Amino acid sequence: MGMNIEVQTSQETELVDITQRVKETVGGAGIRNGLCVVYTPHTTTGIIINENEARLREDILSALDKVVPKGAGYQHDQIDHNAHSHLRAILLGPSAIIPIENGSLALGTWQSIFLVELDGPRKRTVHVSVR
Ligand code: ZN
């Protein structure tokens, strides 16, 4: 079964913790053992799993900024000025797969699921597929 999560982001770059909403989808699916795929269909967002700690969230965004700086002579910037957003999204990837064990996501104690906004603020959709 599948479900969509709608997310309204509020910053240009931002980590949005969607763990609770994914858990609710998995809980409603009635599957004891399987897989949960969290997937973003956008070209300037990513899905990551990591710790939800305020300073680490800042570190993640500033690391992306250092690895792929804004406006560094990209060709795509001649079209819509967001090449850095696309390139950062490629580094993160559009999905995460989480095992479902005994009806729950097999996330580690410190793991949270994030939608990473890289060209906001915008309205975003995340697909959650449970099999
Ligand atoms: Zn673009």
Image (tube, rainbow, N blue to C red):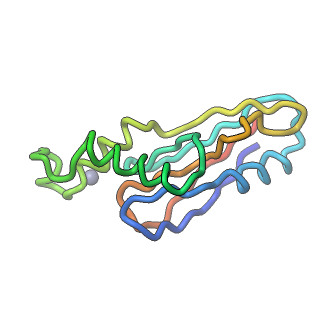
Left or right: where 6 falls relative to 87: right
Image quadrant assignment for residue 33: top right
Total number of numbered discs in the rendering: 0
Q: Considering only vertical position in the picture, is 1 above or below 124?
A: above
Q: Residue at image x 37%, y 37%?
A: 90
Question: In this orientation, which residue lies closer to the viewer: 128 or 62?
Answer: 62
Q: Considering only vertical position in the picture, is 74 above or below 96?
A: below
Which quarter of the rendering shows the N terminus? top right
Q: Residue at image x 85%, y 50%?
A: 28
* Position in image of residue 56 (x %, y %): 49, 49
Q: Considering only vertical position in the picture, is 45 above or below 37?
A: below
* Position in image of residue 107 (x %, y %): 72, 36
Which quarter of the rendering shows the C terminus? top right
* Position in image of residue 9 (x %, y %): 49, 66
* Position in image of residue 67 (x %, y %): 27, 39
Question: In this orientation, which residue lies closer to the viewer: 17 or 56?
Answer: 56
Q: Residue at image x 48%, y 40%?
A: 94
Q: Residue at image x 15%, y 52%?
A: 71
